[in-house]
Amino acid sequence: MVNATSEAPRPELARRLCTSPELIEGGRGLRFEIQRDGLAQAAFVVRHHGKARAYVNRCAHVGVELDWNPGEFFDCSKLYLVCATHGALYAPASGRCVGGPCRGQALEALPVVERDGQVFLLEAGAA
Ligand code: FES
C-alpha cells in the first residue's frame, strides 16, 4: 500500500512515468505502454485540475486510440478528453464519456500518484 507521505512509492510497486512539471494543465499528455497478458497496450497520462490522470488509450466506442496527434488528448476547450475518430468527449477526472456515441461508458482508469515531483503508475497491488 502506498502511504500518504511525500516519499516515492516502492519501486517494485510503481513505475516512474515522468516528472510532475512535464504534465501541464490541459496540455499534451504522455503516452506510455502497459503490459497485459504479454501484450503491449497503449496508455496515457494528462493533468487536469492539478491532478495526474491516467487511462488506457482505447476509446469506449470502437477501441481505437484517442489522441488526434500523438499526445494530444484534450479538446480545444481543455475541459474534455476527445476521441479523434468520432468525437466522443470524456470527463478527464473520471474517464466517463459525457458526449458522443459511447455516452455513459468510460475509459479504463489506471492508478497514478505524484511524489517528490515525479508521476508514478502504480502496479497491481500497490493502490
Ligand atoms: S472510436 Fe472514439 S468515438 Fe468512435
Image: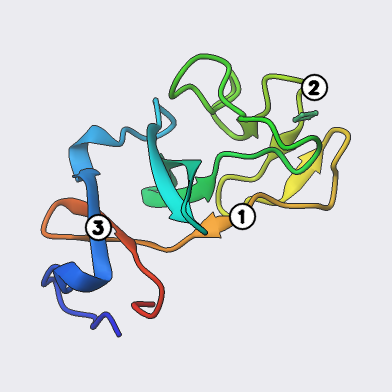
Label drawn at residue 86: 2
Q: Amino acid at mark 2?
A: His
Question: Going 53% across and 28% down the picture, which residue do you hit?
Answer: 73
Label drawn at residue 9: none
Left or right of 69, for residue 63: right
Answer yes or no: is residue 91 visible: yes
Q: Does the beta carbon at disc 2 come under 8 Å from ligand 1?
A: yes
Question: Going 16% across and 78% down the picture, which residue do you hit?
Answer: 5
- Quadrant of the image containing the N terminus: bottom left
Left or right of 12, for residue 32: right
Is the residue marked by circle 2 packed among few (<14), some (14-19), or many (20+) residues within 10 Å? some
Give 92 or 125, whichever is nearer the viewer: 125
Quarter occupied by residue 33: top left
Compute the Cα span from label 2 to label 3: 32 Å
Counting residues from the N terminus, which is met first, the one under dot 3 or under dot 1?
A: 3
Mark 3 sits on what residue? Answer: 15
Mark 1 sits on what residue? Answer: 108
Quarter occupied by residue 116: bottom left
Q: Residue furthest right?
A: 101
